[in-house]
């Protein structure tokens, strides 16, 4: 890897005019600067040739056209329709899905005006039914000028009752609304937590009709939600053509509209839609999600990287890496390709947390460890609060972000080996003009489309998740054995000797 001076520093004339640095690309006002990836022009052209060989453009067209690209489940992946604010027809198996999508938008907007006097919302869901809305609620909380209804938004995901106890200690039962969010409506954590919350409402003296009034559901399995006891007009549907981890754009994102208003929710969708239009229409060489995917592929092929990090220099985006972990690793953490054969590459491990905090944690390894970990630095041009200190603090935040990238790229020699920085550590800079609902939507859609591009390059189906099932199956006999209270459980078909010993220890 080498970093030529002309590709690492912005051209001063351009910078003076506020233009983007050399080697940077812009879409939806989001700037992607790959100058520190150490990829030279001939390597870039090889990478684009590889993208063409993988028929990436055809894949992108098929994705938006509603082709059944999720072959194993024989479905399309049409989350882009959920943010298609143009309402142009999206035909799935001969039927336009947009009227159904628009109807849900109308219902969400109507609900925003109905909830008066609500103090607490308990959003119950896990994985894709949790990360997206949780991230958005956190990220937008301190956007200067944002209007907030000021409800306490509680997210209940874990079956561990610590989260449940914390929420129920704070919420006021008679002015609480509960939203049960589950695509399948069979997820054990979610249904058990929902039962516990209903029991709490009852125990707090809420009548049956008050509980009916409080309960809402968002699901692709409407009959199961009805069976649970949610009244029909409180159920917000979404569809099997939306993957759980791609579902924040559906009514799963209801908390965003309820807390910040429908207009803000629409702006969130609009940012994502704008990024979709870019992904669908831009040539590969200018296509941000594609460029990001190819940069990662390059680091895999040339340097055998096994992990990468996403570091948002924005405290508001601290949940972003957790959202990204599910997106990338559940989508592309697979060893077998669409043809059933082993793949050469799949998702590296993804991790991260907000900078500059992260600098004081694991950046030591980035600078001097034996592993090369490519980094996406995500920065925001405008300060993220309207505090009097904001400008000065933000300058320090940005200078730290820029300094880390430069230090990682160039390294530093020293007589003392302990003080040597090897350098040649690749990174990209993503720069958002500001943090608001629009650019948050654009950022998430950028990474969704990057994950889809990587799947296409690796020949992986990014839209199923068979690997999450086996553990759930095995948990059932183990739970039964734990419930038996016996400390003489024997190994059997579902429980091996090591696990049997652990059960016996727990039961003793
Ligand atoms: O276990 C993984 C998973 O199926 C994710 O794909 C999904 O986001 C999560 O569980 C929750 O599923 P559901 O929305 O059906 O409750």
Image (cartoon, helix red, strand yellow):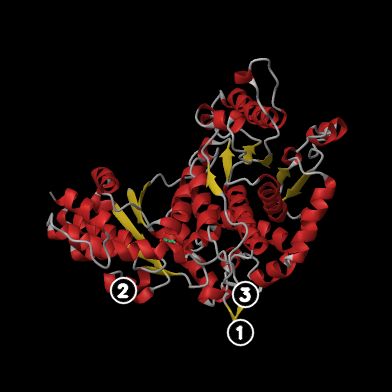
Picture coordinates of residue 266 (x, y %)?
57, 57
Q: Please state which of residues 232 and 361 is positioned toward the viewer in this rendering.
A: 361
Category of crowding for the residue at label 2, using alpha-carbon neighbours closer than 10 angstroms: few (below 14), some (14–19), many (at least 20): some
Q: In which quarter of the image is ligand 1?
A: bottom left
Q: Please state which of residues 221 and 112 is positioned toward the viewer in this rendering.
A: 221
Are the residues at dot 1 and dot 2 in contact (C-beta closer than 8 Å)?
A: no
Picture coordinates of residue 165 (x, y %)?
24, 46
Category of crowding for the residue at label 1, using alpha-carbon neighbours closer than 10 angstroms: few (below 14), some (14–19), many (at least 20): few
Are the residues at dot 3 and dot 2 in contact (C-beta closer than 8 Å)?
A: no
Q: Distance between the residues labelled 3 and 2?
A: 29 Å
For the N terminus, the image quarter is top right
First in sequence, mark 3 or 2: give its number.
3
Q: Distance between the residues labelled 3 and 1?
A: 10 Å
Q: Which mark is residue 226?
A: 2
Q: Is mark 2 on a helix, strand or loop?
A: helix
Picture coordinates of residue 429 (x, y %)?
68, 39
First in sequence, mark 3 or 1: give its number.
3
């Amino acid at each position: 890897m080498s970093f030529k001076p002309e590709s690492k520093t912005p051209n001063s004339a351009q910078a003076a005019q506020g233009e983007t640095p050399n080697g940077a690309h812009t879409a939806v006002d989001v700037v992607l600067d790959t100058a520190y990836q150490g990829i030279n022009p001939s390597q870039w052209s090889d990478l684009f040739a590889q993208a063409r060989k993988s028929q990436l453009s055809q894949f992108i067209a098929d994705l938006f056209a509603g082709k059944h690209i999720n072959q194993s489940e024989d479905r399309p992946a049409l989350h882009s329709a959920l943010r298609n604010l143009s309402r142009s027809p999206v035909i799935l198996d001969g039927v336009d899905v947009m009227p159904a999508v628009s109807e849900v938008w109308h219902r969400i907007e109507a609900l925003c005006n109905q909830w008066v006097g609500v103090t607490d919302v308990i959003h119950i869901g896990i994985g894709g039914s949790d990360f997206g809305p949780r991230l958005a609620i956190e990220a937008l909380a301190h956007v200067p000028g944002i209007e907030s209804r000021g409800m306490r938004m509680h997210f209940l995901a874990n079956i561990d009752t610590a989260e449940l106890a914390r929420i129920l200690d704070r919420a006021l039962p008679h002015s609480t609304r509960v939203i049960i969010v589950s695509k399948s409506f069979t997820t054990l954590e979610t249904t058990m937590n929902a039962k516990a919350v209903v029991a709490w409402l009852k125990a707090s003296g809420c009548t049956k009709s008050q509980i009916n009034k409080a309960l809402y559901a968002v699901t692709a399995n409407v009959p199961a939600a009805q069976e649970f006891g949610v009244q029909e007009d409180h159920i917000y549907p979404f569809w099997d053509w939306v993957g759980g981890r791609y579902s924040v754009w559906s009514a799963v994102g209801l908390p965003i509209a309820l807390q910040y208003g429908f207009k803000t929710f629409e702006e969130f969708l609009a940012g994502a839609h704008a990024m979709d239009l870019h992904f669908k229409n831009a040539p590969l060489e200018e296509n941000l999600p594609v460029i990001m995917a190819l940069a990662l592929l390059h680091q895999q092929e040339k340097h055998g990287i096994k992990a990468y990090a996403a570091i948002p220099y924005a405290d508001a985006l601290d949940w972003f890496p957790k959202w990204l972990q599910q997106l990338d690793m559940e989508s592309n953490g697979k060893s077998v390709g669409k043809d059933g054969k082993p793949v050469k590459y799949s998702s590296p491990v993804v991790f991260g947390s907000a900078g500059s905090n992260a600098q004081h944690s694991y950046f030591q390894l980035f600078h001097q460890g034996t592993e090369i970990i490519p980094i996406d630095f995500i920065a925001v041009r405008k300060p993220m609060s309207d505090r009097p200190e904001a400008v000065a603090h933000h300058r320090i935040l940005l200078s730290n972000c820029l300094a880390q990238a430069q230090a990682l790229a160039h390294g530093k020699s020293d007589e003392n080996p302990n003080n040597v920085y090897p350098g040649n550590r690749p990174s990209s800079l993503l720069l958002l003009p500001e943090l608001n609902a629009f650019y948050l939507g654009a950022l998430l859609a950028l990474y969704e489309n990057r994950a889809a591009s990587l799947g296409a390059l690796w020949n992986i189906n990014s839209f199923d998740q068979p690997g999450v099932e086996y553990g759930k199956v095995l948990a059932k006999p183990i739970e039964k054995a734990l419930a038996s209270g016996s400390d003489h459980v024997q190994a059997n078909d579902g429980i091996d000797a090591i696990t049997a010993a652990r059960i016996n220890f727990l039961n003793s």
